[in-house]
Amino acid sequence: MNPESQDPRAVNLIRWQERLARWRSPLAILAAGFLAFETLSGLSMLLLPFSIPNQVMVLVHTVIGLAFLLVCAWYLVRHWLAYWRSPLSHNLLLGYVGGVALLLCLLSGVVLTIQAAFGRRISYAWDTVHIVTTFATLAFILFHVVLIVVRDRKTATAAPAAIPQAAGAYGKGTLVFVLASLAVVLLGWVAYRPVTLKKDFPADYSFKYGPNRPFAPSLAATADGKVMDARLLSGARSCGTSGCHEQIVEEWESSAHRWSAMDPAFQKVQITMAQQNGPESTRYCGGCHDPISLFSGTKNLFVENEKLTALEGFQEGVSCLACHSVRKVDVKGNANFVIARPVRYMFELEYDRRQSRANRFLRDFLIRAYPDRHVKDLSKRLFKAPEYCAACHKQFVDQEINRVGWVQLQNQFDNWRQSRWNHPGDAKRTIECRECHMPLVASSDPAAGDAMDYNRSPRDGKHRSHRFAAANQFIPPLLKLPGWEKQVDLVEKWLQGRYEIPEIADKWMKGAVAGLEMDTPEAVRPGEKVDVKLTITSNKVGHDFPTGPLDIIQAWVELVARDDQGNVVFSTGTVDSKGFIQPGAFMFKAEPVDQYGNLIDRHNLWEMVGVRYRRSLFPGFSDTAEFTFSCPQLAPVRAKQFPLAVSYQLGAPNRQARKLEVRARLCYRKIDQFLLNFLFGEKSGLTSPVTEMVALTRVIEIRN
């Protein structure tokens, strides 16, 4: 029977009963409770501070969202089927718009869940859709429900109190669902037991430089002035095992930052410094070489056989968080930076072998699903500034160390700042630290892309290499850390100028890092002096060449002249079988001295008061090395009757040298042999590999 032919009262009664049934529907109450909790928990995550309760909220929000997804979808389908033939009204339009927004919200939530669970990062586009549709759903559906309540109260003529009672039951059911969900959040919060962290200095910690400077003589400091548990700054590998930053961790694994604390030379020098100058003085080194140990209070009074480096610090040196937790820097140097206590996610500190797969999954899921704090804390414009590097790559000693006064040591930052590579305000002409030492590499890492760099975009598919390419080709093969072969190969190419960096190719010249030119005469006569002049030019170095601790590092000229019979006529700068450079070589290095004029040759910088000799090249500058030797008059001929004896006679035409070949090389090595023998003993057999940076050969004719 057509409802229009029925009595209007009967029709109204039927409609009223249908509406009453919909208010009391368990499916409707479940859908409303689900929608209310998901909205409230989403707003909590978006608007409230990062916390453990909010992290639990993320997990419960996800679980309930997946559990009741079908319930909500089925309710929307049934609700639409009930009204889709009804005449369009403002309330129906609100319902349609709200329903579409809710479907998009549910869809984007599913996508984000899949990405957080199995991907490397969530899509910010989908995240934006999820947030916008949450507000849209809240606005349209809330008004839709309110208007329905008002309408039903006006049209409920048969039993005026029934609709409000049903609506009240609907509201109570919704509230019960929300409260039950919040109870699950509360239980999760109470049940979670975060790792207990050390918050106090050791009872016997020495505050030699005063309670307000617990990490002195290093200038490094924590934001709250307190000790920092080593686990807060360590665990770099967990950044790679999460499936997120695998490529970056792989690069870091063999970098100088990674092994800055486990460097055996550093460890030997540190122990010597502690024995001679007090263990507290090693904090001077810790700010740059061993920050995890410094901030955890490990560099303290000696206990027999105890190291001054924490296990975490020894393994990780300058870890991911040791760098990315820095909040303030000063170009004074000596680790003049302030580091903040990094906020760690739930399950993030349980990164050792005992960590269950479930814990690791939850840790990774939380970081990806709720990334705002992670990104905000660990990605800052400060990290791109040369001043950030200056905090460690600038060094001095003062009275607290040498008991005499202030002395400047290595200073890459001011070298660069005063050089031709720095053009303040003109990024297209300037080459900064990161552009050389952290060149761009192809990347699928979540950190790929950068909108804050002058020549990059958020979707450029690249990140800055964390190998921190520089000039240490000695330690990687010595420690044989993962990827050391690639690191050494990169360093060799770097030193020889063969490592190409396309993004700055238009700013610096091609070819050798340090150019070499040689002037020789075209011809000489036997017995005449041969004058050789070498010009060494710093072409592609952003600071002094060489740089770093020049009492350790050696760059020198090797020059060997041979006649066309292979006889060595002259040599300088050659390295003998024991690793020592021939005395008198032309060398770039420094010779610091103590207050008594004694040479600082054991890297005992705590005794240094000045320098008696220093030679290095400022960016773009040149230096010359001049050599003189005599053209040979006699050709050596072996006596037939005495095979081991050598006699000399006037060279016959067919035996006399006709040409001289002069070969010059600019060589580099990280540690001189005397220091290696002092630290590890001559019997260790350790020698620092020598890199030929550039070489030239000239031929001189010998005329009678």
Image (cartoon, rainbow, N blue to C red):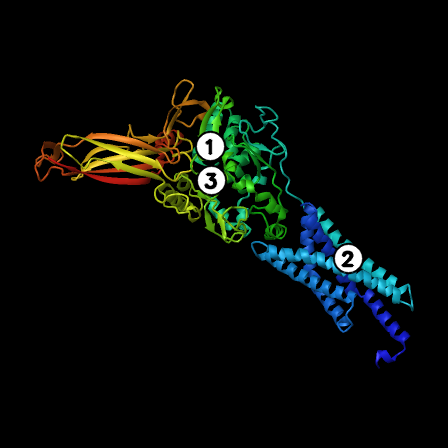
The residue carrying pointer 1 sits among few (fewer than 14), some (14 to 19) or many (20 or more) residues within 10 Å by Cα, namely some
- Do tag 1 and tag 3 residues touch (Cβ < 8 Å)? no
Q: Nearer the viewer, mark 1 or mark 2?
A: 1
Q: In the figure, residue 574 lies in which quadrant?
A: top left
- Of badges 2 and 3, the one in the foreground is 3
Q: Amino acid at mark 3?
A: Cys
Q: Are marks 2 and 3 in contact (CB under 8 Å)?
A: no
Task: Report the number of numbered marks.
Answer: 3
In the rendered structure, which amino acid carries the disc numbered 2?
A: Phe
The residue depicted at 61 percent of the width and 34 percent of the height is 223
Question: In which quadrant of the rendered image does the N terminus lie?
Answer: bottom right
- First in residue order: circle 2 vs circle 3: 2
| In-image side of 49 versus 448 (left or right) | right
Q: Which mark is residue 433?
A: 3
Residue denoted by label 2: 177
Query: How far across and down, in percent of the image, does residue 367 sit?
Result: 61, 50
Q: Horizontal placement of 695 versus 567: left or right?
A: right
Q: CA distance from mark 2 to mark 3?
A: 56 Å
Position of the C terminus, as image quadrant, is: top left
The amino acid beneath tag 1 is: Asp
- Residue most toward the bottom? 1
Between 243 and 72, the one nearer to me in the picture: 72
Q: Is residue 511 above or below residue 104?
A: above
Secondary structure at numbered mark 3: helix
State left or right for residue 678 relative to residue 167. Answer: left
Q: Which residue is mark 1?
A: 414
For marks 1 and 2, give the CA distance. Answer: 63 Å
User: Is residue 586 at least partly visible in the picture?
Assistant: yes
Residue 251: x percent and y percent? 47, 46
Q: Earlier in the sequence, mark 1 or mark 3?
A: 1
Q: Position of residue 187 (x, y in %)?
A: 73, 49
